Image (spheres, rainbow, N blue to C red):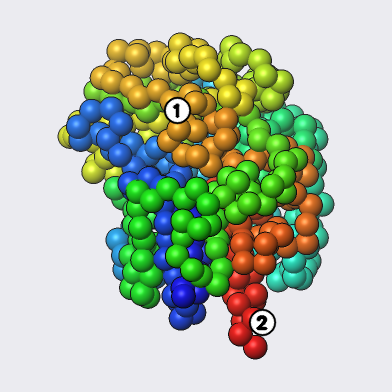
Amino acid sequence: MLDAVVVGAGPNGLTAAVELARRGMSVEIFEARDTIGGGAHTEELTLPGFRHDTCSAVHPLAVGSPAFSRMPLERYGLEWLHPDLPMAHPFPDGTAAVLAHSVGATAMSFGPRDAGTYRRLVAPFLGRWESMAHDFLRTQWLGLPQDPVTYARFGLVAAQPVTLLNRRFQDEKARALLAGLAAHAIAPLCGIGTSGIALMFALAAHAKGWPVPRGGSQAISAALAGLLRAHGGAVHTGFEVKRLDDLPPARAYIFDTSPTALARIAGLGNAYRDVTYGPASFKIDYALSGPVPWTAEPARRAGTVHIGPTSEEIGAALNAAARGEDPSVPFLITAQPSLIDPTRAPEGKHVFWAYGHVPNGWEGDATDVIERQIERFAPGFRDLVLARAVAGPPQLAARNANYVGGDTATGSAAGLRLLIRPKLTRVPYETAHPAVFLCSQATPPGPGVHGMSGHYAAKAVWRRLSAGGR
């Protein structure tokens, strides 16, 4: 009998398996698709030689993850590449606010009236990334914070809606940049906790950067799988699990799936009937004949570019998706990894990645509105397009079953749902079945390639199995 079986080879399933295998447990993973990685996967979606990330592309929370930092993933091929600028936020007049490695460069891009405000905002938290990542990338009520003073100080700011935080700033550049950072949660900006999301992404850039893995996001998954195999674990692909009886006998079953899929497979009935899935993504991958012709020079050096010139426009786009309305002027998150990783495209060519927000399950085509939005800040962009791969909510859900209705966060992150995932319970990784656990990003700390949900699920499994052994 195995000690643990993991269902799903996404970043969290792989992390949970690695952590248990490193403790000497026998672990095997079963993945429905023919390849591993879940949201950290890379393939040729458009033309030969153009390698695209099928979901996540840029990884500030991965390079700063407490779980990954304890693993020798570089021995298994993971290499981080950092752009000159982590992120740029261009404006119609050809200027841009930037999220730079330097706090000073970031502050000065906002203009003289807001530079000091930004410096004062982030100053108490600089140099404290390790303790903050430990204290906030977790279930908040499980265990005491490592740095109580910083935890309390950050928590007072983090709990605010970003719309309230933005009242500290006088000009639109700072407001738009922070709104764009908060929008990564794919939730209305007026929700509590959105300031915390924005600040964590900003602090990650200052402490660790916003890098891409050489060769694509698949390198993260491959490194985790290599480390798992080095500790005796195994990964089985092309194995769809429809019920627990499909799996070999084990002391624990750990699901890197949506909560509803877990309930169906494990026979837990309506255990997760109240889970709410949030707005969806509409994603386009491009093969380009050259770099994106941004009007704003900083955007030509940034790994990530946010497109939405005002905080009001960003908020309106998110609100429309949450209300179920068709997109008209979307807020876009874009990535251009081939600027710093030449392995991603043929010489002189580039890959480009963009997504906006649409209602859950939306079946329309947002290609035109997305490309019109890009052209506002990069005139002539369409002339560079060699090929495009379009994925709306149905295609995203077909590609990854965890993305219910195209929700790439595997559950709404609006309001308290970022903390209380997937439902209110003391240990969200445990279920009503004593041998069944949930480790996907449907659990705290939520979406992102950081492995922390898998890390804490593995701890819960270890405690349960150790207690059983005694």
Residue sitting at x 20%, y 35%: 49
Please provide percent x and percent y for residue 343. Answer: 23, 43
Marks 2 and 1, how far apart at CA: 43 Å
Q: Which amino acid, mark 2? A: Ala
Q: Which residue is mark 1?
A: 395
Whether residue 178 is visible, yes or no, is: no
CB atoms at circles 2 and 1 under 8 Å apart?
A: no
Look at the picture and state if 408 lies above or below 236.
Answer: above
Q: Which residue is mark 2?
A: 467
Name the amino acid type tagged 1: Gln
Q: From the viewer's perspective, is 145 left or right of 235?
A: right
Which residue is rendered at x = 47% and y = 50% of the image?
A: 241
**Element carrying mark 1:** helix
Q: Nearer the viewer, residue 246 or 64?
A: 246
Between circles 2 and 1, the one closer to the viewer is 2
- Which residue appears at 30% of the width and 31% of the height? 45
Crowdedness near tag 2: few (<14), some (14–19) or many (≥20) residues, C-alpha within 10 Å: few
Q: Nearer the viewer, residue 329 or 98?
A: 329
How many residues crowd mark 1 within 10 Å: few (<14), some (14–19), many (20+)? Answer: some
